[in-house]
Amino acid sequence: MSMENETKTSPVTSLDLLMELQGEQQAFRFLVRALSALLATAALIAVGSVIYFYFELQGLRAEYARQAQLNQVNLRIVAGEASRQRESTQSQLVAIREENESARRQAELSRELQQAGSAGQIAAYKDRAVAIARGHILGKTMNEVTSQVVAMVLRADEGGSVRLLTDAQRVLMQAALDDWGGQVESSAVRTEFQTLLDDGASLPDQAIGAAGLAMLEYRKADGNSLGWNRGCSTVVDYVNQSVARGLNEPMLLLWKGQCLRKRGDALLSHQAFSQAAQLMEQDPEDITLEQSQMAHHGVGTTLIALAAQDQLPEGRDRNVALQEALTELRIAAKIRADRGSTRIGVAYTEENMGFIYVLEEDWPTALSHTENIDHILPLAWNLTVRNIAARENEQALKRAGSSRAAVEEMRRIQSDTAMVLSLMDCGQIDKAELMRLLPQKYSGQVDELAAHCLVESGGI
Amino acid sequence: MISSISPLISHHRDELKSQSRLNRTILIGAMLAALGAFSVFLLTLLGHYPLPTGERIFADNPERILGASNFFVATAIGAALRMWRMRQTRIKLLIAEAFLREGDDETGLRLLLEPMFGDGVWRGAKLNPLAEMAR
């Protein structure tokens, strides 16, 4: 119905159709313009998308490459950790072998002991037993044979009608035997040594008591990587008490030297190590390879620290001191290898030579030396030295106008070493001691490399 | 009877026109929205997310805004295509209407029906314009 009305009210004329057609023409023009604008918008967005995703993919590619590199570095660190474990096992094997070797050398003593039946015969071994017990505390650990001597003399003393030993000797031997056996609690051994120190009748008895306590404290501190605040300060106290009572033994000085080195007292530490080395030269008979290695390593490392901190005694030439340090470290590395250590153990000592090359500003040698160590395993100090050497060498190459490839190589070494260090455990970096082995001007660089370690390890 | 169809066509044409107007609005709106979204994308890429909301969703993922602008472009293209198609229909109807008005019902009817059903629309019919034309 409404349609009919509409039909009546709006008859279609030619003019209407013409106007409609004109309207269509206008709409067509609009459509063409709109489509052009649409095309332009679509093209703009397409170009924008292509550029955006191109850069995004570039970023992804770079990220992938970085992740792959991180993976490789992590694998190296894990492999290094496995090497450390192997070296640790090897050290234990070396210790067992040394103990067996010393027992084998005393085979004659073992036979004599088997034949010694009466208390009188055993009494003849008293002085030797006391010496063995003292030696155990002072770095010459007991073995199966020598422990028998001590045990037999102790039994003879307890069972016989006549007392063979003084009270102090008995306590000393019992403490040494308990410590060797490892079956008695360490607190009991500590109490025995404390008794010797407090109640010993003579100064030598008190001195050996203090030495025993120093031994226990050093062992505990060594388990915590010789952190100064975790017990190493007490080692120095006990050693000083022992020395004050007239006991001047290389092992005590070595413990003291190691602990003072951790505290950062390079001069006193160097004196302790040098004194120990001197005593060893005077009486080399009872010196173990381990003690000898510790002394040479200590003298070399403390000389480096003294040179780095400009604390060398007056009149001492810096270059001569550095050469001496190099020689000492080489000797220490050789002893370590002779003891049966793997090349990883040797690398622990040789690693410190890198600091000498930094102090001498011999960058090419520093780079080749650190590269050799790095091929064995990634070590924090070695990587730090390598990073410093690469940075300094880069500057030197730029000054000399060397090729771009050589400069790029130095940059690559810097970024690689920084990446490995950033993934390393802070305990391995030991920033406090590392700072002491390098000149002051590199402290900023060390901070940068160990930025992930918020708390400094060790030292005061 | 044919003459009574003409106003119907006229009415249908008007309806198409109003639909076309809607499409035109969608087209312009979608184009503006696409350009707006692209501008937001560029600003986000430069580190200045400009909108008061949606920062959590879009600020770190500019490609999502790029997706939105692509959606608007696609909507605009759809609207433009619909407009084009309706325009074609309207012109056909206009011409058919003109023929009907001039009394040429046959041509008018062909113009109306053949675009929809094809040439086979006259098959079996009593009045077959194609057959007459062939004769």
Image (cartoon, helix red, strand yellow):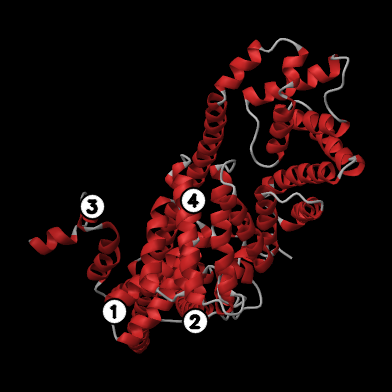
Which type of secondary structure does the marked residue at label 1 adopt? helix
Q: Identify residue type, mark 3.
A: Ala
As measured in the structure, the alpha-carbon distance from the residue carrying label 4 to the one carrying label 1 is 30 Å
Mark 3 chain: B
The verdict on a common chain for dots 3 and 1 is: no
Label ID, residue B125: 3
Residue B57 versus residue A288: which sits nearer the camera? A288
User: What's the amino acid at mark 1?
Assistant: Arg
User: Which chain hosts label 2?
Assistant: B
Provide residue A268's location: percent of width, then percent of height: 69, 65
For label 4, count other residues whose C-alpha is less than 10 Å away and answer few (under 14), some (14-19) or many (20+): many
- Disc 2 marks a residue whose amino acid type is Ser
Dot 2 falls on a residue whose secondary structure is helix
Q: How far separated are the C-alphas under marks 3 and 1? A: 90 Å
Q: Which residue is mark 1?
A: A404
> Left or right: where does residue B115 sit relative to residue A179?
left
- Does the CB distance between marks 4 and 2 fall below 8 Å? no
The earlier-in-sequence mark between 4 and 1 is: 4
Query: Could you say which disc has been placed on residue A77 in the image?
Result: 4
* Percent position of residue A335, x then y: 47, 47
Evaluate whether residue A109 shows in this view.
Answer: yes
Query: Dividing the picture into quarters, in which one does residue A430 lie?
Result: bottom right
Q: Nearer the viewer, mark 4 or mark 3?
A: 4
- Badge number at residue B39: 2
The secondary element bearing badge 4 is classed as helix
At numbered mark 3, what does the secondary structure look like: helix, strand or loop?
loop
Both marks 1 and 2 on one chain: no
Disc 4 versus disc 2: nearer the observer:
4
Indicate the amino acid at tag 4: Ile
The reply to whether callout 4 and callout 1 are in contact (CB within 8 Å) is: no
Q: Which mark is residue A136?
A: none
Q: Is residue A269 above or below residue A217?
A: below
